[in-house]
Amino acid sequence: MSATDESPRGSSPSGAAPTPYEQMQASPEFKALRNRWRRYIFLMSGLFLGWFLVYVLLADFAPSVVNARIGGSNFTVGLLLGLLQFVSTFLIAVLYAKFAEKNIDPDSEALRAQVEEKL
């Protein structure tokens, strides 16, 4: 079989029966699972990128705000915001783990079991 006999993305050659994995990809359950995952990922990515953009724009266009000292110490608003970037990254990872455990993993396990039954 030549490389031209296969269609893009590794699917079956034309006329051949689809593999169990390809059948699973075409199922409404898989599409719903994928859409649920994408909605969550795009939402969290957008929120994080927006939060990061606010931090960068404040540093660039409002240096007096970022350089303001907190409570008479050497700790500034910019330093606090920078540290909160790390906290928000960790929080997003924890939230994703909980979301996946509750909303993604059970359905993906069921789909995997269906595919393994057909193998």
Image (spheres, rainbow, N blue to C red):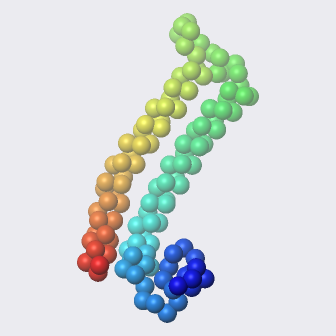
Residue 35 in the image, given as x and y percentages of width and height: 47, 66
Q: Residue furthest bottom?
A: 15
Residue 25 in the image, given as x and y percentages of width and height: 43, 75
Q: Residue at x 47, y 38 (%)?
A: 89
Can residue 90 be seen in the rendering of this structure? yes
Which of the 4 quarters of the picture holds residue 61? top right
The relative height of residue 98 versus residue 14 in the rendered view (above or below) is above
In this view of the protein, which residue sits in the foreground, 104 or 58?
104
In this view of the protein, which residue sits in the foreground, 5 or 84?
5
Which of the 4 quarters of the picture holds residue 114? bottom left
Residue 91 in the image, given as x and y percentages of width and height: 42, 38
The relative height of residue 82 versus residue 105 in the rendered view (above or below) is above
Q: Residue at x 49, y 93 (%)?
A: 15
Horizontal placement of 110 versus 36: left or right? left
**Quadrant occupied by the C terminus:** bottom left
Q: Residue at x 54, y 48 (%)?
A: 45
